[in-house]
Image (tube, coloured by chain):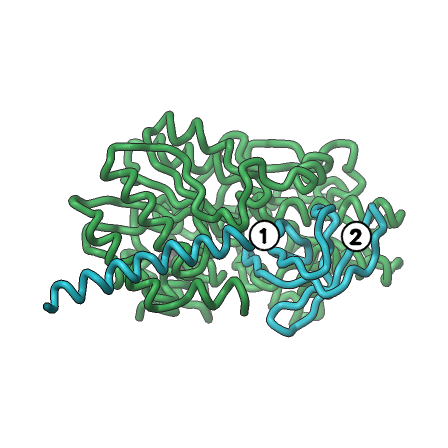
Chain colours: A cyan, B green
Amino acid sequence: MCLAVPGKIISINSNNSEFRTAKVSFGGAVKEINIQWLPEAKIGNYILAHVGTALSIIDEEEAEEAIKTAKEFEDIQKTLDESLNK
Amino acid sequence: MKFVDEYRDIKTVKALAEKIKSAVTQNWTIMEICGGQTHSIMKYRLQDFLPKEITLVHGPGCPVCVTPLEVIDKAHFIARQENVIMASFGDMLRVPGSDTDLLKIKAEGGDVRIVYSPLDAVNIAEKNPDKKVVFLAVGFETTAPANAMSVVEAKRRNLTNFSILSSHVLVPPAMHAILSSQRSLIQGFLAAGHVCTVMGYEEYIPIAEKYKTPIVITGFEPVDILKGILACVEQLENGEYFVENEYKRMVKKEGNIPAQNTMFEIFEITDRNWRGIGEIQKSGFKIKEKYSDFDAETLFDLEGLSKDEPKVCIAGEIMQGLKKPFECPAFGKECNPENPLGSPMVSSEGACAAYYRYNR
Ligand code: SF4
């Protein structure tokens, strides 16, 4: 129930300030999601959705950063392995 | 799926596990607060990647599991009334009350409907003006704003046949309760990333300081969880304790303020009973007086419905990190997902169900 999943905004349906909704694609499955708590959300943004509402816009720079640092560990490990095997 | 697959990459998981191994010099016990993280840990067998010095214990962060028996019994009572539609998230249907569950009530002819969103329950009310629609509104700070929005929306649409049976719980008071217990074994916390998307993480700063315990905001994919553990271990090894955000792509320090505003428009803080744990002060939400027309507690006569928990279930100790599911004498025997005795066996986020599903 607490599951929240990332999806991409493909269109914004209603800009009613009291009830703003968008069509969001979750890996191809499209659902209508309320986005009124993300006034700055735009088409093309990735958002985190939970029980029909969007809670945050995914910060793509931070997302890449997280992967990059993890990949760096991978490289360090590879170098370590290589030096141990020599 | 973007923002999912890359966080499940096995090479990255292994590299992070290596990094944790080289950081650890002694035993550490870390609690992941959220049931969604427990589920991932079991599903991806993350414990197998970790050095033996690290013990992960599973926190009370499954709202289905901690919803008190009394509330479940109230929901069952309401669902059996004439002209009522009971709407609920799917995982509440099999939660055992004192004598039945919502699925059985449905089989007996009760109008019980599964909804994906509380807003779907509002739509059901709009389409069925001659029925009273009650939404069983449980959840942590992640779900409370959407549940609050259902009331705002019902009011905006002038619906008089919609109400919620509310049982909301809050994470920081539970962390206080766990850490202040004499029996607590917890040395570090992985905080629930999705709760923090709403609430931010300023509330955790005094907790980390008071109990000298590192708190790391952590996501839900394998790479996220290992990054959270690594950050926690590094703090522990350095004798540090502060709040660290390892889920920056989703979580901002201040959280989502409009969502908080919706939540605090409808709810106010109250003492709450947690199933299996007991009452924790100021640990939940109740509906404000001015929205009592939308509060199922005031619309139905629910007095005298509370009963005691089944004795055999040790869910409370499991959710405080004191015991593991397989230490329960009923685990996998009388109690299994087909026939749950306690709620942690029902929800896929419950520790007992996660152990049953992935660990056997
Ligand atoms: S195995 Fe069943 S009875 Fe035992 S603690 Fe878990 S839910 Fe309760």
If the picture is divided into quarters, which one holds ligand 1? bottom left
| Camera-nearest residue between B180 and B80 | B180
**CB atoms of marks 1 and 2 within 8 Å:** no
- Is disc 1 surrounded by few (<14), some (14 to 19) or many (20+) residues within 10 Å? many
| Camera-nearest residue between B165 and B251 | B251
Q: Is residue A29 left or right of residue A78?
A: right
Coordinates of residue B203 in the picture (x, y in percent): 50, 31
Task: Give the labeled residue for mark 2.
Answer: A20
Please give the chain letter of the residue carrying mark 1.
B
Residue A51 visible (yes or no): yes
Residue type, mark 1 in image: Ile
Residue type, mark 2 in image: Arg
Residue B293 vs B2, above or below: the answer is above
| Camera-nearest residue between A81 and B271 | A81
Say which residue appears at 29% left-offset and 64% top-offset: B14
Residue B84 vs B253, above or below: the answer is below
